[in-house]
Structures are given as C-alpha cells and as structure tokens.
C-alpha cells in the first residue's frame, strides 16, 4: 500500500532533514513544475486530480486556486497561507506531517504559491505545536540556505518569501478568514463572504489558505501525474487520506490510507478494535464538529461524499470512538464546553447559544435536567445551523449534539429521570 | 439612483439597488429589527437580528434564512419578513441576547427609549427559558460624560466600530471573547475621543448612558423637547434639548442630512449645563451708583431707569454679539441705529469675519456643508486646527479620506455598505488630505502630508498651490520644498472629483483666508466642483458679519468723541473680545451701561442695569452657520424668573422710550429684519412661522406619554394651569397637538409607534440615512457669485525675531468656548493654560520640560505651563486661548517668553 505522504517518515519520529527529504525524492516535483509547468497548468492538474481540501470542508483545491486573479493586472503581493492551526478535538493528522516531514509541507506550499503566483507565504501554526515549530523553523532555514526559498528558486523567475507565524491559540483561527484577521494583527473573528480571500484576503490582497495535508498532496500529484494520483484512492475523490482514531480502541493513532477506506477497516484493522471490556457505541468520524454515527454505519467509506450520504461529515477524517462505559452526555458536554469557550464572540447565536447548550448539558449531567431540555437542545441545534450564524463554528458544534440527542436519547432521559449520571464510576 | 425590484412577502417594491435588503426594508417602512447595522456605518452581520427568508425564485418553496443587512438588494430578490422560520429565528436572537441582559429596565437610564426594548417587543419574545446564571462585568469610570454599565451589553459591536473606525479613537476597544466580550478602555479613565458622547446614541441599549443626564435623570417621555441648534461653535449642528422642571437635562442629536448627520461632538452634547449654571442671571439687577453692588429691583424701576438711560438713541452705542441670535442683534441695531451698532468683536476679528463673508458671497467656490466634506475625495486645510475649532467638520474629514480609496473596493465589486469587507480591501489607504498648520492637530494621523509653518508661510504655500493650479493666479516665489509640496497638493486637488478647501478665521490670519480663496478660485477656474469650508468661531459669527456693524475699537472712539454716552451690551463679555485696557476704557467711557446677558461675566459687573437674557433653550431665534445656513432654534421651555429673550428686553427699552416697533413676536422681528436687510430676507424661511399649524394644531413639545402633568405643580395649585402660550413658535408646551411628523425644522423628537429610541429617525427620512422627509431644515443664504478677483499680494516670508516669538492661537475643544465652560464636565476636561514651543526654542530659553513660562504680549502677561512640541515651527509659540485664564488676546502677535520665577503660580 502506497503512503506517499508518510512513507518516508522516520521510525524514531525525528523530522526528515533536507538531505533525507531530497534522497526520498523531495523537491523533485517543485523542480519539475518550475521547469515544465505554467502556473495555470499546475492549477489545472490539481483540479483534475480532484484533491479536496483536507481541513474538513472538502472544497476542491483546484477550483479555489482558479479564483485567484492572475497575470500582470492582479493586485500584489499575492499570498499563500498554510493553515497549520490544527485544533479540532481528536485531530492530530497535520501534526504528524509538520513534525515528521516539514519539507513536504514546504514543497507543497511552494508549488501552491507558484500556481497562484504568490510572492509571500505564511505557515500559520497552532501555538501548542511547539515541536512542530522547531521542525518547521529548522526546515525553513534549510530551504533558505539551499536557495529553495527566496529569490529565483532553482534559477527560475519564481521567488517566494516564507514566514512562520505561531498563533496565539484559538480554535477559530482554523477558520480561514479568522486566521487571516489574526495574521493581520486584528481580532480573530471570521469575515463574511463574498468577497472571497482569493480577491481580498490578506491585507486586502489575494490569498489562498490551504490545510497542511492538502498542500502535502500537491507534490504527489505533480510527481505521479493526475491518473496515478487518483488511482491512490478507492473512490473518485483523489489521493490518500490520513485517518485517525482515538477513544477506547486498542491502538489509537493516525494512518495514511487510500481515500475511501471503510470505518470498519479503520476500527478493526488499524485501530485494533475496541479495548477489552468495552463495547462500541458510536463515533464522530472527523473531529468534534461532525455528527455521531452508530453501529449501522461502520461499513461506510470514509470520503467526503459517502459520509455526507449517511448524515455526517468526514471532516478531518480522524474519528473519536465512544464506548459503552463512557457517558454520551458527558462526552457531548465536553465537546460543547470546548465550542462555547472557543466561540469568538462575534455573532449572537454562537456566542450566547453555545454556552446555554453547554450549561443545559451540564445540568443534565449533574442530575438537574428537565425533560423539556431535550426539546431545547434539539431546537438550539436547529437554530444554530448553517446560514444562521456568521461562520461554521456553531453549525459544526451542534452536529454532534443533534445526533447525540437522537442516537442516545435514552441515556439523556435516564440522566433526567434518575437525576444523576448513570455512568458515574463506570469508565475507569 | 440605480433601482431594483424586490419581492417582499408577495409584493413588488422599487428599491435602491446599491443598498442591502435591511436598508430597503426599513426605507419601505417595514418593521425589521436590527442591532449591529448603522446607516452611517454600514453592515457587518454580527447580531443576526435582521434575518429574513430568501427564495431562489417563485418555485422555491423552502428558501433559506439570510441576514437582510448582508444581502444586496438585487433585481428580482425574493424575500419574506413574515415567514415563520424567519420570525422564530428573530425571536431566538432576542432570547439569546436576553440570556445575559439584566432585567433592570426600571432602573436603567435607557428604559423607555431603548432600541433593545423595542426590538424585543417587535420580535415577540416574551418568556424566559434560560435558567442559569448571567455573566457579570466590572464597569469603568469613563470620565464626566458617560456612564458605563457593561452588564447590559448585547455585543453588537457598534460602539467600537463608531469609536475606532468612524471617529478614529484609540483608547477604547473590545476585549475578551466567547460570551465574555468587554467593551471599554484598557483601564478606567475619561474617554479621550471628542465624539465619545455619540456612544450614548449608537449603543442600542443602556451600556453607555449620559452621565450629565443621570445627575438629574428624567425619562424620555417626561422630557419636554424642541428642535434646536448647537450654540457652541459655528458648524450649526442640529440638536434636541430636553427639559423638565425648569432644568435642561440633556442634548440629543437632531439629524440633519447636510450638517451633523447622526453625530455631535462632546462640546455640543455636554456643553448645555451652562443653562442650569449658578452663574445665570435670573432677575433684573440694578446698580444705583457706580460703586454699589447690583441689587434686585422691580419692573417699574427697571422700566423708568431704561427710559432714562436710553432716552436718546443717538447717544447710545449698541454692542451686539456673535453668540446672540440674529433677532437680538437686529433689535439692538434697531434701537441704536445702524451707525452705532457694533458687532461686538475686535477690529481684527471684524475684518476677518468680513473677509470670510466676502469669500462666501463673492468667491468662486460654493460653501461646503459638512455632508459635502464627508463625501468629497480630497481636502486641503490651510491654517485651521479643525478638531478643536470645528470638531464636527473634523469627523467629516475622517470620512473624506476613505472616499478615494473606495475605488479599490468598488473595483472588487464590494458594495459600500459591506463595511468590514470595504475596510479589509482598502486597508490603510487614505485619500488626499493635506494639512498646513502652525501646530499639531488630532487629524494629523490621517493626513497625506502635514506642513508646519508660521501663518504667513502657510499662506504662501496656499498662493503657490493656486499658482500651480492656474497660470492666471498671482505669481509667488517659494523655495523648492514648498514648490514641490504645492505641486503635489495641486495635483491631488485637481484630479479629485470634489476637492474641498478649508480655512477660517480662528487662525487669525487674513492672508490664510486669501490664500484659501485663491486655491478655491483656481480649482473652479480649472473646472473642478470645488467647495470652500470656512471655520468660524461662534454660532452666529457669520450672521452678525452679514448684518454688518462697527468693531469694539470703533465703538470706543464713538464714546471718546462724545458722540454717545450710553452702552447697551447684548450677550457679550467684552473682556473676552479685547484686552482688559480697552474693555475698561469702553465701560469707563460710557456714563450708563445696560447689559443683557444669560450669565454673569466680568462685563455684567459694570452694568448699571443687568437684564437676564434667555438661553437657546428658553427662547427661539435664528443663527447663521459657517456654511451660510440660517437655522431656527425653538425654545424648549419657559424659564423661571424674569428671563426673557434679549430682543424682548430691547423691545421693552424701545417701548419705554416711546418707540414701540410693535414687536410682539419673533416673526414680527424677523419681518422687520427681512425688510431692512435684503441679504438676510430669506431667514424668514428658515422655519415655519409661529402661526403655522398642522391640521389646525401646534406641534407638541411633550410626548404623548408625558406623565404627572396634573401633579407637577400640585404643591402650588390643585388646578391644572393652562400650558404657557408661545407667541414665537408653532410648537406647544403641551402633550396635545399634531401627532404625526412635523416639517423637519419643527421636529421636536424622533418617535414612531414601536420605535421609542433614537432609531425612530428611520421613520422620518425619505430613505434610511437620507434627507428628512419634507426637506432639510434651514435655508442657505449665500451662494458664491464668482465676482471676486484673485488676491494678488501674498505676505512676505516669515522671519524669526531674536528674543521674540510669534504667538499663535491654540484652541481647546474643551475650554476655548465661553458658555460650555460653565458646564462642570467640560470644565473638568479643559486643559490648564499652556504655551507650545519647539524643543529647540525651549532649549534656547533653557526651559525644563516641566517649566512654567511667562508669556508677555501687548495685552499683558500670562504665566502658563510649557508644552514642548516639535510640531511648532521655530520662532513660533502656540498659546492656549479662550480659556478663562487667557482671553482678550489678539493673535497672532509678537511676544516674549521667559521662564517663570520659581514659586510663581
């Protein structure tokens, strides 16, 4: 099985330095592209590969790039930003790449910057990823030292300045427009679209923001060609995907696998099944802001379209597994506390609705719930839906909530009727 | 206007296609609730209150919720306000806001005029389901003007958008995140921005309340209000004063599309307390002989004394005032005759005012309204410290610099109402604003370039700009640096669609006015739609200039020549106008002095008779703003005591001298004024006359819920007295009268059913953010005729003098205006007297940074604090003027500076 993004990773977890990376074929794609591909051709290639954004939304990468104004009339400088603010609960796939294969991230950024004719690039890195900060800083220095960054890269007319920005640590900075505000030094609040960042994004100039894993796919596409890249996948969504699993499974972790690997394979083959004494009850497939799936969905293929069909989202593709000895109310409460805390405070529904939800869940968990609370939670889930709020944070936050209230309704009712958490003392 | 047809709940409407749906719905009169959107600040989509259902087409049965404020009013847009889901969502937004909003309406100053209350009722949310604790905040002391009650905050972000984005404030921001967002300063302290008072009206609920109102609090529905005009500078902002129990309680903004729009400065808003000041003169006082103290007297005694004093009008000199109404000045002029009428200003100021008038009357460029400045795309300021002398104009300049860069956002297809997106696209780009001043100003930070020099050198720059624009303009030799700058300014102005030139009289320099006139002339000669904005010192400076009259120095000569022996002084403290020697000489040269004034001043001490004049809140009258706009203010309440408008006291004197003019009402005075002075004839049309009625009714000054009417005087009489009659205004001191929208110059308050807050204004405008229905208040009296040739003579270059400094005037927004300084809050914010000096000059004088400096001028000596400022040119010093401690100086003038001896205060 091919693992183009991770097969070169060292077993000891140390990052590949520039020599190791080049020995493993690194920077070949960039050389090829600069020599043989016009920016528009590269964009067309990425579009043809059907690379979908790996940050969770699954937006076609090539389509995003095509919206960037090109040519001499475009406003400059143009920017490329690598979104390395990985803070989705249960998600640690970008970390694997940032810590283990930093030059792959850089090469992906350089290719993307070349495709959109950007002059300046930023890595927007989550503050808590301090090891990644070290590896990225070292890698950037190595790349500059070899002349792979800076003026006239590989003797081509293409030049790129690349900076590392360590963020201050807010979940909302993962939202691309809030990230851009934060990068500009403003409050990390999202922006309304349109205008899209490709026309007016960073300091009023065109920018493309792309997730770490997405960017790492770009050298693969260039290196192998569109067809070979697409062949890596089991579905029509191109490439491989770094999946992950956490919770009470035998071997929690992250694995690069063909796009479209089923949940059952992930759970049973790669995560080793449930830990002894624990039974599977459900999972959230791609980080905290996705709907719970139950036992009946374990044969679903993990790609954007397939998971969408069964009423959830693949999101980041890193699942959190709920077992039979963990309180589902407590799990949802923990998620909602996170989302309420990470709300930026800009729009009313998210700012006021999520804390209300969290407090209601806390009351239920503490045995002070009321049956009408379930109706309230369902209603809030509906009212905090897409289009109602300013950005996707609250709609994402209510996905696990709305599905949990349906899927685990009996657990909620037991909390309320028994006036206590029936799981207390079981989880150990 | 590009229009579009939009379908709202099954009907088609034509709306402004460049606007958003919220703007469209409100302009059409729909009740669509909102918070974060503001007509002057655009949309940001934060509060989610204006949700409506949008449908793709007529076959779309489901539709989706969108925010009206963030959705363009495009052709064919189909929306429903009444849709069940939209309705439920809007009620939910209120429910969310109420999660943390304290239920303290009964003790909240905003109660009864709270937009949040109105919107809550509008959405129908009425039952509290949230059962947990609320978040609480610590409040800050924000200074003498504003109360802070953060617990009430609904996080609409309007305050911070106004304060920072619109008004350029720095010391106020939003802190924190999630449901713990805080709007305030980094620490307690007075808000520094001079437009902070607008937070009171911008905030949709009671977070920022008027602290001056709180000290004598009354509900909005218990305030008697009237349409008025600010008296604290010459811009002529429209205001709504509110009164109860004979005390003026507050000032609110009265929207005028061409003048103040939605915003007032803090001096205009909080300067009103002089009306309640202990310094007010409440009853006639008489001084039996020169050394006696003024004592109370009787009507009869006053009448006979006045008859005696003013028996011979030909022996009387009348001193009018730029802070008195046209009517009062005209009455005085009628009493003494045109030859012996004095404008009440020094010869120097008179010349400046007449020159300013000549520019507006015979110059080439049209006088700019505030709105013109706000929407223009380039400006050149010559000599004036706009933020201190005409603050509302400075706020307009902050909007002006945003106009030209909006080409960028326009080019990206971003609608102008999409505020955050426009700001993101244009970043820190600013349109051309060139400032040429003798010291720093608070708008330096937004200027394209700042040029500092002595006034004469600034004027030379102006002449050079005119020359760069038009080869016909007078030639002038200037250095390369100035020539290059002049070229840059000329290019910026001539390439702009609507360039503005700003100058004025407060810099005290005729050459500066002439230079500005030449620049405006040259721009018009080049075919530009240039406008000229003049900064004048007082609320009726231009009015008295148009009336014409002598200076105080000339009045002194008349007395000295023995041609007169009696002075009648109306609303004027001579000691603020001329130096102490001249003022004493004037008062000493007169055998009899009659003073009519609102407050006690140094001058009132010299009156043989002191007559209590009514303030703007107690009488009606007309003022001419610096734009040449005559505007009527109407009395808010009937004052206690024997306080009367000055013109009525003059009528009394005329009557006592058996020269009854038959003036029983303001309209009769105005009619006489119009007959006598053709140029001012149109002031009659500034507002409808007192006999004006709507459906046979007057316009009520009291709202229909005015309470306690029958009990207010119960300790005096159990009978309800009839409302006081008002011969001067078509308004009634009553809650009874025409209940609908009055003509815009007569609107005493903004209220509409369901809209109790200031936001009711939407219902009074032709379209939201546009002109008031029925035309804007006031009439413009002057339209530039273009008859004036270029001024040919530029002043010679400024030359420093050894041991002497050119002392130039430095104004303080808080402190330099006479009446507002009687308001405690304004006095608290006023600076101590100071002189600003270049660091090199301070070094030459061996002045320590904390030194006190003795400033010696022809008029006298002042010991003031030193302010070292590299913005001051060498050889020049900026002396704070108009403060109670430093007045009666004519600047610029040469003077000397020295360190104050130790221990001297």
Image: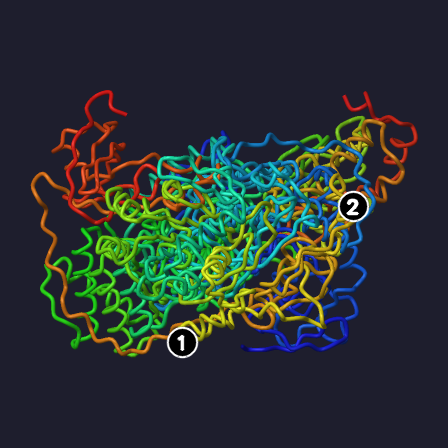
Chain ID, mark 2: A
Q: Closest to the observer: B872 or A346?
A: B872
Give the quadrant of the N terminus of chain B. Answer: bottom right
User: What x and y, as percent, mark residue B565?
Assistant: 30, 53
Q: Are marks 1 and 2 on the same chain?
A: no
Q: Quadrant of residue B610?
A: top left
CB atoms of marks 1 and 2 within 8 Å? no
Q: Which residue is at 14% across, 71% downward?
A: B474
Give the quadrant of the C terminus of chain B. Answer: top left
Residue A16 numbered tag: none
Look at the picture and state if B757 lies above or below B291: below
How crowded pointer 1 is (Cα within 10 Å; few <14, some 14-19, many 20+) is rated as few
Viewer-side label of 1, 2: 1
Q: Quadrant of residue B62?
A: bottom right
Look at the picture and state if A313 lies above or below B29: above
Question: How did the renderer colour the structure?
Answer: rainbow
Side (left or right) of A81 relative to B879:
right
Secondary-structure class at tag 2? helix
User: What x and y, as percent, mark residue B208?
Assistant: 58, 42
- How far apart are the two marked residues, 1 and 2, measured between alpha carbons? 77 Å
Residue A402 numbered tag: 2
Determine the residue located farthest toward the right in the rendered image: A417
The residue where tag 1 is placed is B678
The total of numbered circles placed on residues is 2
């Amino acid at each position: 099985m091919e693992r183009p993004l991770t097969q070169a990773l060292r077993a000891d977890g140390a990052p590949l330095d520039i020599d190791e990376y080049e020995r493993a074929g690194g920077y070949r794609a960039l050389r090829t592209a600069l020599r043989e591909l016009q920016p528009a051709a590269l964009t067309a290639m990425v579009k043809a590969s059907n690379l979908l954004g790996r940050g969770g939304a699954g937006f076609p990468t090539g389509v995003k790039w095509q919206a960037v104004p090109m040519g001499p009339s475009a406003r400059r400088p143009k920017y490329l930003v690598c979104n390395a603010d990985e803070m989705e609960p249960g998600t640690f796939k970008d970390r694997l790449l940032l810590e283990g294969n930093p030059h792959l991230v850089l090469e992906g950024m350089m290719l993307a910057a070349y495709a959109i004719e950007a002059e300046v690039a930023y890595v927007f890195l989550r503050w808590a990823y301090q090891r990644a900060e070290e590896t990225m800083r070292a890698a950037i220095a190595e790349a500059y030292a070899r002349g792979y960054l800076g003026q006239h890269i590989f003797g081509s007319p293409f030049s790129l300045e690349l900076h590392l920005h360590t963020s201050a640590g807010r979940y909302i900075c993962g939202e691309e427009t809030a990230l851009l505000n934060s990068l500009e030094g403003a409050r990390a609040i999202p922006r309304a679209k349109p205008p899209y960042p490709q026309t007016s994004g960073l300091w009023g100039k065109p920018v493309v923001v792309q997730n770490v894993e997405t960017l790492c796919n770009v050298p693969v596409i260039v290196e192998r060609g569109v067809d070979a890249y697409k062949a890596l996948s089991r579905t029509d969504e191109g490439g491989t995907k770094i999946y992950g699993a956490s919770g009470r499974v035998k071997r929690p972790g992250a694995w690069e696998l063909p796009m479209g690997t089923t949940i059952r394979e992930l759970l049973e083959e790669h995560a080793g099944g449930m830990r002894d004494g624990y039974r599977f009850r459900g999972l959230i497939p791609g980080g905290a802001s996705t709907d719970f799936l139950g036992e009946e969905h374990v044969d679903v293929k993990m790609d954007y379209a397939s998971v969408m069909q069964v009423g959830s989202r693949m999101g980041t593709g890193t699942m959190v597994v709920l077992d039979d000895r963990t309180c589902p109310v407590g799990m949802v409460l923990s998620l909602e506390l996170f989302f309420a805390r990470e709300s930026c405070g800009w729009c009313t529904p998210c700012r006021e609705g999520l804390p209300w939800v969290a407090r209601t869940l806390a009351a239920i968990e503490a045995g002070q719930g009321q049956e009408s609370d379930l109706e309230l939670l369902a209603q809030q889930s509906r009212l905090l839906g897409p289009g109602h709020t300013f950005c996707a944070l609250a709609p994402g936050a209510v996905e696990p909530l709305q599905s949990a209230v349906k899927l685990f309704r009996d657990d909620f009712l037991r909390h309320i009727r028994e006036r206590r958490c029936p799981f207390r003392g079981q989880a150990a | 206007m590009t229009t579009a047809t939009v379908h709202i709940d099954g009907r088609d409407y034509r709306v402004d296609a460049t606007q958003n749906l919220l703007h469209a719905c409100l302009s059409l009169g729909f009740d669509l609730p909102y918070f974060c959107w503001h007509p002057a600040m655009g949309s940001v989509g934060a509060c989610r209150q204006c949700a409506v259902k949008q449908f793709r087409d007529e076959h779309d049965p489901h539709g989706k919720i969108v925010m009206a404020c963030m959705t363009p009013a495009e052709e064919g847009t189909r929306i429903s306000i009444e849709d069940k889901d939209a309705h439920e969502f809007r009620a939910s937004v209120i429910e969310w806001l109420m999660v943390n909003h304290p239920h303290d309406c009964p003790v909240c100053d905003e109660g009864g005029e709270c937009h949040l209350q109105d919107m809550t009722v509008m959405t129908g949310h009425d039952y509290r389901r949230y059962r947990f604790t609320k978040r609480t905040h610590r409040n800050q002391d924000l200074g003498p003007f504003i109360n802070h009650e953060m617990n009430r905050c609904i996080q609409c972000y309007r305050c911070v958008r106004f304060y920072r984005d619109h008004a350029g404030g720095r010391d106020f921001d939003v802190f924190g995140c999630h449901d713990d967002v805080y709007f305030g300063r980094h620490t307690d302290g007075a808000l520094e921005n001079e437009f902070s008072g607008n937070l009171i009206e911008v905030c949709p609920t009671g977070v920022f309340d008027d602290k001056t109102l709180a000290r004598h609090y009354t509900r909005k529905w218990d305030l008697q209000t009237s349409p008025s005009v600010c008296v604290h500078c010459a811009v002529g902002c429209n205001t709504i004063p509110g009164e109860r129990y004979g005390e003026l309680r507050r000032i609110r903004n009265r929207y005028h599309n061409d003048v103040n729009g939605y915003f007032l400065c803090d001096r205009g808003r909080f300067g009103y307390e002089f009306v309640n000041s202990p310094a007010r003169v409440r009853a006639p006082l008489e001084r039996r002989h020169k050394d006696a103290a003024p004592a109370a007297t009787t009507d009869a005694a006053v009448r006979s004394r006045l008859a005696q004093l003013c028996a011979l009008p030909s022996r009387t000199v009348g001193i009018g005032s730029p802070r008195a109404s046209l009517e009062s000045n005209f009455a005085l002029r009628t009493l003494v005759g045109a030859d012996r009428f004095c404008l009440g200003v020094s010869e120097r100021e008179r010349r400046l005012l007449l020159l300013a008038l000549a520019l507006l009357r015979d110059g080439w460029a049209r006088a700019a309204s505030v709105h013109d400045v706000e929407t223009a795309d380039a400006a050149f300021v010559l000599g004036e410290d706009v933020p201190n002398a005409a603050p509302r104009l400075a706020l307009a300049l902050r909007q002006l610099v945003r106009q030209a860069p909006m080409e960028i956002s326009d080019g990206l297809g971003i609608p102008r109402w999409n505020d955050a997106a426009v700001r993101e696209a244009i970043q820190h780009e600013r349109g051309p604003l060139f400032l040429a001043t003798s010291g720093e100003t608070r708008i330096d930070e937004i200027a394209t370039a700042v040029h500092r020099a002595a006034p004469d050198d600034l004027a030379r720059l102006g002449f050079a700009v005119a020359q760069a624009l038009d080869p016909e303009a007078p030639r002038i030799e200037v250095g390369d640096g100035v020539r290059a700058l002049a070229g840059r300014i000329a290019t910026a102005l001539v390439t702009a669609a609507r360039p503005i030139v700003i100058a004025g009289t407060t810099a005290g320099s005729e050459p500066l006015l002439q230079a500005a006139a030449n620049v405006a002339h040259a721009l018009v000669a080049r075919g530009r739609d240039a406008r000229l904005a003049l900064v004048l010192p007082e609320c009726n400076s231009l009015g008295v200039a148009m009336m014409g009259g002598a200076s105080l120095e000339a009045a002194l000569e008349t007395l000295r020549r023995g041609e007169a022996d009696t002075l009648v002084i109306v609303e004027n403290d001579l000691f603020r106008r001329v130096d102490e020697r001249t003022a004493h000489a004037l008062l000493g040269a007169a055998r009899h002095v009659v003073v009519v004034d609102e407050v006690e001043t140094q001058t009132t001490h010299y009156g043989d008779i002191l007559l209590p004049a009514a303030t703007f809140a107690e009488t009606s009258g007309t003022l001419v703003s610096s734009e040449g706009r005559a505007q009527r203010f109407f009395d808010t309440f009937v004052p206690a005591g024997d306080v009367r408008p000055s013109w009525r006291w003059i009528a009394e004197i005329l009557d006592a001298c058996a020269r009854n003019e038959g003036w029983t009402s303001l309209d009769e005075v105005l009619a006489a004024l119009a007959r006598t002075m053709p140029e001012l004839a149109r002031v009659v049309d500034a507002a409808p006359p007192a006999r004006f009625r709507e459906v046979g009714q007057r316009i009520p000054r009291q709202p229909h819920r005015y309470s306690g009417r029958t009990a207010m005087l119960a300790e005096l009489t159990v009978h309800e007295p009839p409302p006081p009659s008002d011969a001067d205004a078509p308004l009634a001191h009553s809650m009874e009268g025409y209940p609908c929208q009055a003509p815009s110059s007569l609107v005493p308050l903004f209220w509409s059913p369901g809209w109790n807050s200031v936001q009711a204004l939407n219902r009074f405008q032709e379209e939201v953010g546009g002109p008031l229905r029925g035309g804007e208040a006031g009439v413009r009296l002057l339209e530039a005729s273009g008859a004036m040739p270029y001024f040919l003579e530029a002043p010679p270059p400024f030359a420093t003098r050894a041991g002497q400094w050119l002392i130039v005037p430095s104004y303080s927004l808080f402190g330099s205006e006479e009446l507002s300084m009687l308001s405690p809050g304004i006095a608290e914010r006023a600076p101590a007297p100071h002189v600003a000096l270049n660091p090199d000059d301070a070094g030459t004088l061996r002045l320590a940074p904390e030194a006190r400096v003795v400033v010696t001028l022809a008029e006298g000596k002042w010991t003031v604090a030193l302010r070292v400022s590299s913005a001051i040119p060498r050889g020049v010093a900026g002396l704070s003027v108009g403060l109670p401690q430093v007045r009666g100086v004519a600047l610029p003038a040469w003077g000397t500076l020295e360190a104050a001896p130790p221990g001297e205060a």
